[in-house]
C-alpha cells in the first residue's frame, strides 16, 4: 500500500484527529488570537511540506519562522503543538479501543503479542491453568514504567 493512503479501518482515527485539530485551532484563535493561530498554521504547513515532500524551500521557511520567534511566541507555539500531540494520543487510544471492540464483536483471533494469544498458545501446547498458576507464583514480575518518545502522556501540560 502506498505511504500516503489510509486503510479504511483507520479513517475514523484520521477524522477524529482532524476534528480535534479544528477544535484546537478554534480554541487557539479564541485564547491566543488570530496572529498566533496563523503562525502555528504556517509552521505546521511548512513542516508537512518539508517532511512529506522533502521540500528544501519549506525547510528554509521553517527555519526562518522558528528563528524569528519571540519568547512569548515560542511558548504559544510549543503549547499549541503539545496540546495537539495530547489530543492525537487521546484519539489513538480511543481508536485502539474502537478497533479492539470491533475485533471482539467479529470474533477475530487474538492478536500476536497479546495476553489472550499467549494463553491460547499455552493451552495449545498442553499447559493447563494449574501449571500456569504455578509458574506465575514463582515468577518475579516487576512493573517498569518508561517514557516512550512518541507518547506525550504526562501529568503536566506546558
Image: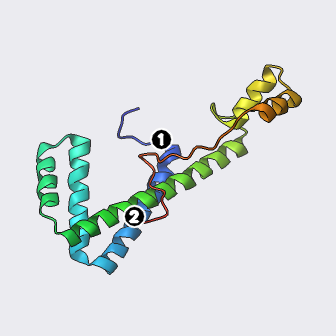
Task: Count all numbered tags in the image, as a single digit.
Answer: 2
Q: Is residue 35 left or right of residue 122?
A: left
- Identify the residue at image location x=14%, y=53%: 63
Q: Residue furthest right?
A: 130
- The picture quadrant where one finds residue 119 is top right
Q: Residue 52 is drawn in which quadrant?
A: top left
Relative to 109, is 83 above or below? below
Q: Quadrant of the C terminus?
A: bottom left
Look at the picture and state if 155 lies above or below 129.
below
| Residue 27 in the figure: left or right of residue 117 | left
Tag 2 residue: 83
Quarter the N terminus occupies: top left
**Depth check, front residue: 35 or 22:** 35
Q: Nearer the viewer, residue 120 or 99?
A: 120
Q: Position of residue 55 (x, y in %)?
A: 16, 43
Q: How far across and how far down the image is residue 93, in percent?
A: 55, 53
- Closest to the camera, between mark 2 and mark 1, is 2
Which residue lies at the image location 60% right of the left edge and 47% below the top edge? 99
Query: Label for residue 129?
Result: none
User: Could you say where residue 137 lies in the image, as x and y percent from the top left?
Assistant: 81, 35
Q: Give 108 or 47, whichever is nearer the viewer.
A: 47
State if disc 1 and disc 2 touch (CB < 8 Å). Answer: no
Dot 1, how many residues are within 10 Å of its Cα: few (below 14), some (14-19), or many (20+)?
Answer: few
Q: Using the image, determine if residue 157 lies above or below residue 63.
A: below
Residue that carries the numbered disc 1 in the rendered image: 7
- Residue 25 in the image: state x and y as whole percent: 34, 69
Q: Could you say whether the residue bearing mark 1 is in a helix, strand or loop?
A: loop
Amino acid at each position: 500500500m502506498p505511504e500516503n493512503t489510509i486503510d479504511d479501518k483507520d479513517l475514523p482515527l484520521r477524522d477524529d484527529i482532524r476534528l480535534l485539530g479544528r477544535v484546537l485551532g478554534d480554541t487557539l484563535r479564541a485564547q491566543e488570537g488570530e496572529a498566533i493561530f496563523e503562525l502555528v498554521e504556517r509552521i505546521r504547513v511548512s513542516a508537512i511540506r518539508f517532511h512529506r515532500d522533502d521540500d528544501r524551500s519549506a525547510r528554509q521557511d521553517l527555519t526562518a519562522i522558528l528563528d524569528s520567534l519571540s519568547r512569548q511566541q515560542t511558548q504559544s507555539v510549543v503549547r499549541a503543538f503539545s496540546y495537539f500531540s495530547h489530543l492525537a494520543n487521546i484519539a489513538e487510544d480511543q481508536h485502539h479501543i474502537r478497533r479492539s471492540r470491533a475485533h471482539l464483536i467479529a470474533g477475530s483471533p487474538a492478536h500476536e503479542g497479546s495476553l489472550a494469544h499467549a494463553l491460547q498458545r499455552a493451552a495449545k501446547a498442553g499447559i493447563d491453568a494449574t501449571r500456569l498458576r504455578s509458574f506465575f507464583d514463582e515468577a518475579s514480575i516487576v512493573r517498569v514504567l518508561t517514557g516512550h518518545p512518541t507518547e506525550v502522556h504526562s501529568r503536566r501540560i506546558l
